[in-house]
Image (cartoon, rainbow, N blue to C red):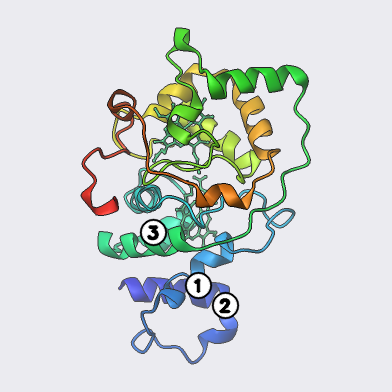
Amino acid sequence: MRIFVLIAFLFFIQSAVAADVSPVDAPDTMAERVKACIACHGPEDKVGRDAYYPRIAGKPVGYLFNQLRNFRDGRRHYQPMALLLENLPDQYLREMAAYFASVKQAFPPPEPLIPSPEEVRLVHKLITLGDPARKIPACVECHGRDLMGTDPFIPGLLGLPRVYIIAQFGNWKNGGVMRGQTPDCMSEIAKQLTTDEASAIATWLAAQPVSESVLKSRTPAAISVELARRCSSIVLESGSFQ
Ligand code: HEC
Ligand code: HEC
């Protein structure tokens, strides 16, 4: 069934090769599995064609696995992906997550956005200090000093399209993207941020250049147990990902 779904999608996007592939004969290699994904998450520059698709190459494996489960199980909504992932077992999703986590893909150039000096000050404060009065921890405490994420559960924040970041904050604020069980640290944080703050953060993040070298330095999370407990997507005893 799952191979059929994948193949059905390949037919849809790659009608040229569809004619002589039958679901029974299709080899179950990683290259075959991810063909449909690469149509949207591939290395080409998506700016102009569709600036919304998030980068997934090189993201922490536990994070990718969590998101694939969320789309499959209806906790995060995007219909084309839900259809592709329907009925796939966890092990299959784990292997796809491991594959994409290992892919090296150049980062796109920063978006040509210029945040105002006021926005820069505001964003810098939220990222490095947070806002204790509103129970907003500094972003760097979880996402890493260089904002490139921490293994295995927390994604990097650079190299993502501005519109994508704004949509995530909007959905968290409105309860749309729950992405998992409660507590959901990001929806709690998003609910505290004003729309202007979320917009300034998205503009600033998307305008940052990414140095390829920082990816090599991504370290396992060193976040406090107290902070990790705020996020149900961080599994403290995560034997299989460490
Ligand atoms: C038709 C385009 C399309 C296809 C095909 C597609 N995706 Fe996606 N993917 C998206 C979009 C759009 C989002 C962001 C959805 C949202 O707003 O939450 C996304 C989000 C994701 C995320 C979460 C990224 C993040 O940073 O949170 C992962 C992981 C992912 N896709 C993996 C895959 C895999 C694996 C496949 C193949 C089985 C796939 N996608 C196929 C468009 C696509
Ligand atoms: C307590 C830890 C913690 C703090 C503090 C935190 N985050 Fe997160 N963030 C996470 C986790 C965990 C995820 C992954 C959520 C998931 O798996 O559903 C995440 C995901 C995200 C994403 C989604 C990235 C993607 O690829 O879809 C964005 C954007 C984000 N955080 C922005 C921020 C910003 C901006 C701040 C500071 C204002 C911040 N975060 C503070 C833990 C944190």
The yes-or-no answer for disc 3 within 8 Å of ligand 1 is: yes
Q: Is residue 140 above or below residue 209?
A: above
Please tell me whether mark 2 sits on a helix, a strand or a loop.
Answer: loop
Sequence-earlier tag: 2 or 1: 2
Quarter residue 94 falls in: bottom left
What residue sits 44% from the left and 77% below the top? 32
- Of 125 and 114, nearer the camera is 125
Q: Position of residue 89 (x, y in %)?
A: 26, 62
Q: Residue at x 38, y 61 (%)?
A: 98
Image x and y of residue 111, in percent: 73, 43
Residue 112, compared with residue 44, is above or below; it is above
The circle drawn on residue 35 is: 1
Q: Are marks 2 and 1 in contact (CB under 8 Å)?
A: yes
Mark pair 2, 1: CA separation: 9 Å
Residue 170 x/y as whole percent: 54, 30
Upstream in the sequence, badge 2 or badge 3? 2
Q: Which residue is mark 3?
A: 97
Nearer to me, 144 or 72: 144
- Badge 1 element: helix
Q: Is residue 116 left or right of residue 40?
A: right
The total number of labels drawn is 3
Q: Amino acid at mark 3?
A: Ala
On residue 201, the disc is none
Tag 2 residue? 14
Q: Which residue is painted at 59% across and 42% down in the image?
A: 158
Distance between the alpha carbons at the discs numbered 2 and 3? 23 Å
Amino acid type, callout 2: Gln
Q: Earlier in the sequence, mark 3 or mark 1?
A: 1
Q: Amino acid at mark 1?
A: Lys
